[in-house]
Image (tube, rainbow, N blue to C red):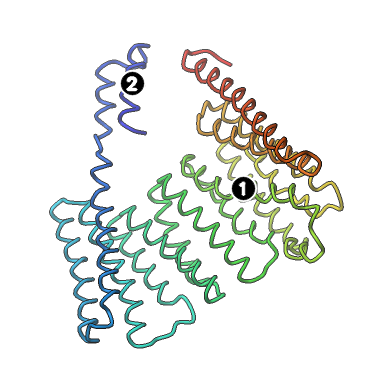
């Protein structure tokens, strides 16, 4: 919640005699004036400076004596850490964190450069895991979101590199990231950090499934375990941030089942379908844990979100139709909850989902027999019409709520 929003809305509360002018001033003073643009300059500067140093050293690296190379790595890294600590002690928090972040980047660059100097060949992610672990330690030391995001990027990028180049997946890196950064995320209750953590976790689970050549459905066991954990978070803004990415993954899977199911061969099915007994048991257990968390917070109706995970894919027929209905039901549910809670984000999100579901149905039904130019023209007109209707409805509901009416 920003200071500007409080200042604007608070005046309306004073006019309606909900709060007094003195209370309004007290509430406004709780939100300090923040200069985000200025505060970001040291962080952006640290990124550019780090890239400049790395590019300069890389261009002249072969001409530098080996002992001097080692000395440069140590001096640069220690210098950034020491400078960051000094600025933090003097109260220059942004600049101090920026220099500390450069120290972390220098540490990782040093690991890579030392390996090149002595022709060390790595066949796993041990060095990257150590680098990420150093980032986690610094994150807890300085309680910094910026260091958190760098650490998360290190783990995610390392797994991506290992998947593409080494064709391996590091369980140790995933566990260290999930536990170390997960606990920090739970402590901070930051929506941004929670979104990033959830996205990284889902991407790494996807990499794991591809590297191990597991059936795609196994992806949704760890992903929905993350979703179920979100039902036990008391702060709903963080809970929604945890659960949105798993729901998007399930929504994309349902869309692919609608559009591509009829072209699947038996070999393709082997790449999708997990062993029914183990998969369904695990899914039911996660569903029960999720529902218990929802009931504990009086949110039992949100169990309807699990409709995207209904195992229609195991049925002998009608799979495309069932997944299409699930897409529409889920979209309507999100819209309904958005209007009930008067939450603009949910209304917008539900609107986007409904429009996507409509286009999926339209494409499924008309792509094969309609002229392609006519297909896009009619589809565009349909989207514009639906967008106008839904936006008009949203505006009306929000205006009624603001005026104290009930819809």
Q: Residue at x 51, y 29 (%)?
A: 343
Q: Is residue 171 left or right of residue 82?
A: right
- The picture places residue 306, in percent across and down from the top left corner, at 67, 45
Contact between marks 1 and 2 (CB within 8 A): the answer is no
Circle 1 or circle 2, nearest the eye: 2
Q: Residue at x 74, y 57 (%)?
A: 280
Q: Which residue is label 2 attached to?
A: 10
**Near-viewer residue (223 or 149):** 149
Q: Residue at x 34, y 88 (%)?
A: 118
- The picture places residue 313, in percent across and down from the top left corner, at 78, 53
- The picture places residue 246, in percent across and down from the top left corner, at 58, 50
- Graded by Cα atoms within 10 Å as few (under 14), some (14 to 19) or many (20 or more), the crowding at tag 2 reads many
What mark, if any, has residue 86 been given in the picture?
Answer: none
Q: Is residue 5 left or right of residue 333?
A: left
- The picture places residue 266, in percent across and down from the top left corner, at 82, 64
Q: Which residue is label 1 attached to?
A: 290
Q: Residue 272's quadrant in the figure?
A: bottom right
Q: Is residue 187 above or below residue 213?
A: above
Q: Is residue 376 above or below residue 82?
A: above
First of labels 1, 2 by sequence position:
2
Q: Residue furthest right?
A: 316
């Amino acid at each position: 919640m920003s200071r500007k929003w409080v200042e604007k809305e608070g005046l309306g509360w004073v006019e309606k005699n909900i709060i007094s002018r003195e209370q309004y001033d007290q509430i406004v003073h709780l939100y300090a004036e923040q200069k985000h643009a200025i505060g970001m300059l040291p962080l952006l500067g640290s990124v550019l400076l780090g890239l400049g140093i790395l590019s300069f050293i890389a261009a002249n690296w072969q001409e530098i004596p080996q002992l001097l190379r080692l000395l440069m790595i140590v001096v640069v890294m220690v210098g950034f850490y020491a400078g960051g600590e000094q600025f933090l002690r003097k109260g220059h928090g942004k600049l101090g964190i920026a220099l500390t972040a450069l120290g972390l980047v220098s540490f990782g660059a040093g690991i890579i450069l030392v390996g090149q100097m002595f022709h060390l060949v790595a066949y796993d992610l041990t060095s990257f895991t150590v680098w990420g672990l150093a980032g986690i330690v610094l994150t807890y030391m300085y309680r910094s979101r910026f260091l958190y995001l760098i650490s998360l990027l290190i783990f995610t990028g390392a797994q991506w590199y290992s998947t593409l180049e080494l064709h391996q997946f590091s369980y140790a890196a995933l566990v260290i990231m999930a536990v170390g950064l997960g606990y920090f995320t739970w402590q901070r209750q930051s929506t941004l950090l929670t979104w990033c953590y959830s996205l990284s976790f889902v991407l790494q689970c996807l990499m794991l499934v591809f590297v191990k050549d597991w059936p795609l459905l196994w992806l949704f066991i760890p992903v929905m375990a993350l979703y179920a954990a979100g039902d036990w978070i008391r702060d709903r803004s963080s809970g929604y941030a945890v659960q949105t990415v798993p729901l998007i993954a399930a929504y994309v899977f349902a869309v692919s089942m609608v559009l591509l199911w009829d072209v699947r061969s038996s070999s393709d099915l082997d790449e999708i379908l997990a062993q029914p007994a183990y998969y369904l048991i695990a899914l039911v257990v996660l569903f029960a844990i999720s529902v218990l968390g929802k009931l504990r917070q009086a949110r039992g109706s949100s169990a309807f979100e699990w409709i995207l995970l209904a195992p229609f894919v195991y049925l002998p027929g009608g799979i495309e139709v069932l997944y299409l209905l699930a897409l529409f039901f889920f979209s309507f549910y999100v819209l309904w909850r958005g209007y009930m809670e008067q939450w603009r984000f949910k209304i917008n999100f539900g609107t986007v989902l409904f429009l996507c579901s409509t286009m999926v149905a339209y494409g499924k039904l008309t792509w094969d027999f309609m002229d392609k130019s006519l297909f896009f023209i009619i589809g565009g007109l349909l989207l514009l019409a639906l967008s106008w209707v839904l936006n008009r409805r949203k505006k009306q509901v929000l205006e009624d709520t603001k005026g104290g009416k009930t819809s």
